Amino acid sequence: MPVPAIRPASTSTSPTLAVRRRRLPALTFAFALALTGCGGGSADGTDAERASAGSVDDAFGSVDIGKAERVVALSVSDADAALSVGVVPVAMTEAPVEPVMPWAEETIDELGGDDPELFHWSTEDTIPFEDIAAWEPDLILATGTIIGKETHDQLSEIAPTLGTAEENTPDSWQSQAERVSTVLDAKDQGDKAIDTAQTAIDDAAKDHPDLTDRSFLVALFHSPDEVGVLTDRDSATVQFFSELGLTLDPVADKMADGSVPDSLSLEKLDVLQSDILVGYFPDPTLRKKYDGVPTFSSLPAVEGGHFYQPTDEEWRGLRSVSALALPEIVGPIAEKLDTAAVGS
């Protein structure tokens, strides 16, 4: 799993969609459930209008519903997956960097309809169950985030809930696009979105052969004296870089098994010896601070110009990789990685 430190701060860098933020009535959870008229994870077989669009398994069972019209997306990439097949969620998680990312905003504008409600949550304890129930969803998407069985069961009492294919592992962007499009009865559109995104990645890898077999690490410089490192080979971020031809530095595996800390003090930064170092600074002033830290400035990747510092928008795209985002982000990021591969 990604280390807790890899969590970008919430900032805004560009104008975003003007999204309504309703003040919902104070509902008890039980009353909110009564309003929805929804049961658990399967459709009511007596309702002819909810004939199955496609049964999709997840880590906790299966979802088998009719055509969903009111979708709540519990992660940024879940919202992207719905948008990529023409479904605008009634509500979706607010992105940490920008409330609505540019590719999502553009798609929402193209599709028309009402702007989605935005909500924020940071742990399972802060999921706004009452708000979600009040939006009266007929489907909740949670394929791009980790929720436990208890939370899944609570959400399924509101509406059928599609979780990750494997417990404790977010879906890959390909799996997410396939599973979400299937449950939304839009498999052909999902396949098209996957093909478009995969072509963008393949073209970028072909155009930048210098990335092949170069090692990389992803670090979050989130404080003046501590650096978090992404170690999960199954994460969407690592998969993104790997599909461009890069290889995760073996030290990440040592961090994952605990033999090397995955949260580094300034004195331990010398373990960051990858060919390319991807480093994000939530606070831009921290970069100036780290430039004055000898253990940072003397790193081979920093000294040799092999350091790629994502923008806020690029970082959000890297942390929530989706079929919708990939055609927008992969080209510019591959160009910058190529520059880092060549160095100065």
Image (cartoon, helix red, strand yellow):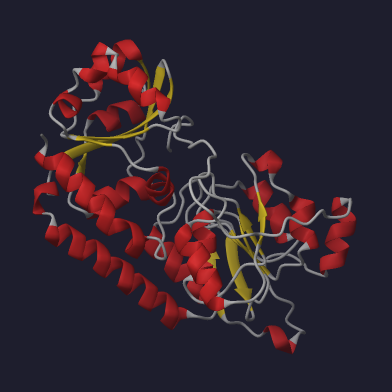
User: Could you say where residue 308 lies in the image, as x and y percent from the top left?
Assistant: 25, 38
- Would you say residue 55 is visible in this rendering? no
| Left or right: 292 in relation to 344 | right
Residue that appears at 64% across and 76% down = 113
- Would you say residue 209 is visible in this rendering? yes
User: Could you say where residue 41 lies in the image, as x and y percent from the top left?
Assistant: 67, 66
Q: Is residue 190 above or below residue 96?
A: below
| Left or right: 299 in relation to 160 | left
Residue that appears at 59% across and 47% down = 147
User: Could you say where residue 266 lies in the image, as x and y percent from the top left?
Assistant: 34, 13
| Quarter location, residue 92 | bottom right
| Left or right: 295 in relation to 171 | left
| Quarter location, residue 10 | top right
| Residue located farthest toward the front when viewing the structure as drawn | 15
Residue that appears at 57% across and 74% down = 87
Pick the quarter of the image with the N terminus: top left
User: Could you say where residue 292 lies in the image, as x and y percent from the top left?
Assistant: 29, 14
| Residue located farthest toward the bottom when viewing the structure as drawn | 48
Q: Nearer the viewer, residue 214 or 109?
A: 109
